[in-house]
Image: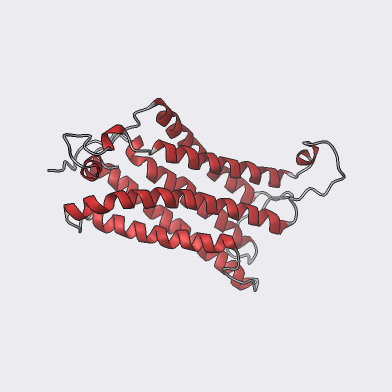
Amino acid sequence: MVNYGGKGPKPTTHVQKVALVIAHVCAVVSVILVSRWANGTGEGFLGGLDWGDKNLVFNYHPVLMVTAFVFSFTEALLVYRTFPFSKRVNKSIHLGLQTLAVILASVGLRAVFKNHQETNKADLWSLHSWLGLAVFILFLINYTVGVGAFFFQLAPLPLRASILPYHVLVGITLYLAAIFTAQTGIVEKLALSGKCTAHYPPTEGGVHYSLLNDGCRLANWMGLVLFLTALAGALAVLPAQHTREGGRGGRGSSEVLLETGV
């Protein structure tokens, strides 16, 4: 019988432990950087947040989407690797963080549609918008499956055991896809701003970058932090040895995953 009161698994390698710390730190730093980028008023920055301003309302979009899909999603992904609580408690924390991501992302999408409506811009015209909507819809589907099947346990144990590996795999895939989509959003915003392209006379390498304004430079560094968050987060949740087939008395990996709470 599966023990639902057991402790969640921990990283079993030094590399995973380092990756766990890096992922947590970078997730927080990403929120700080996107908030600074959105609230800054200098060249290359987005100019502030104001839900009542038809232009500044857009700036809620990057802040809320990064907070949802980089911070909350990362922390939800790492819950079972981080907290020494029972599986039921860890599962509740995981659900809470994923629910927060759904709420923040929903408001973030509303912000960009509101901006487009009030400034007479087309919706869903770019690759970034297509990827973003696809990730959000798939995230909602995986979230709904997780809530129904695993939190409320509406599905019988054999069914939960069969779908859990796919739930985990889809979750990690969407996590990476969400951060990749955020990267395309940064690139799109920088390109559309027209303020982050260095049109300077030919010179030695490295000088052009030093002439970029602070806002564009911060956005570039934010992109690197998001990239590092994705790498570290994915590495930190790689299956440990006890999740291999037959790792505990010959039981299948799905049953072990259900017991450990991965």
Q: Is residue 214 visible?
A: yes
Q: Is residue 151 left or right of residue 81?
A: left
The location of residue 123, given as percent across then percent down, is 58, 70
Q: Quadrant of the C terminus?
A: top left
Protein image colouring: secondary structure
- Residue appearing at x 34%, y 38% in the figure: 239
Quarter of the image where one finds residue 54 = bottom right
Is 95 situated above or below 229? below
Say how many tags the image has: 0
The location of residue 254, given as percent across then percent down, is 24, 45
- Residue appearing at x 63%, y 41% in the figure: 221
- Residue appearing at x 51%, y 54% in the figure: 65
The location of residue 27, given as percent across then percent down, is 49, 41
Task: In the displayed orientation, state which residue is furthest to the top.
Answer: 14
- Residue appearing at x 62%, y 52% in the figure: 186
Q: Quadrant of the N terminus?
A: top left
Quarter of the image where one finds residue 127 = bottom right
Q: Is residue 95 left or right of residue 229?
A: left
Of residues 95 and 224, the one nearer the viewer is: 224
Task: In the displayed orientation, state which residue is furthest to the right.
Answer: 201
Q: Is residue 27 left or right of residue 210?
A: left
Q: Is residue 33 left or right of residue 157?
A: right
Q: Is residue 27 visible?
A: no
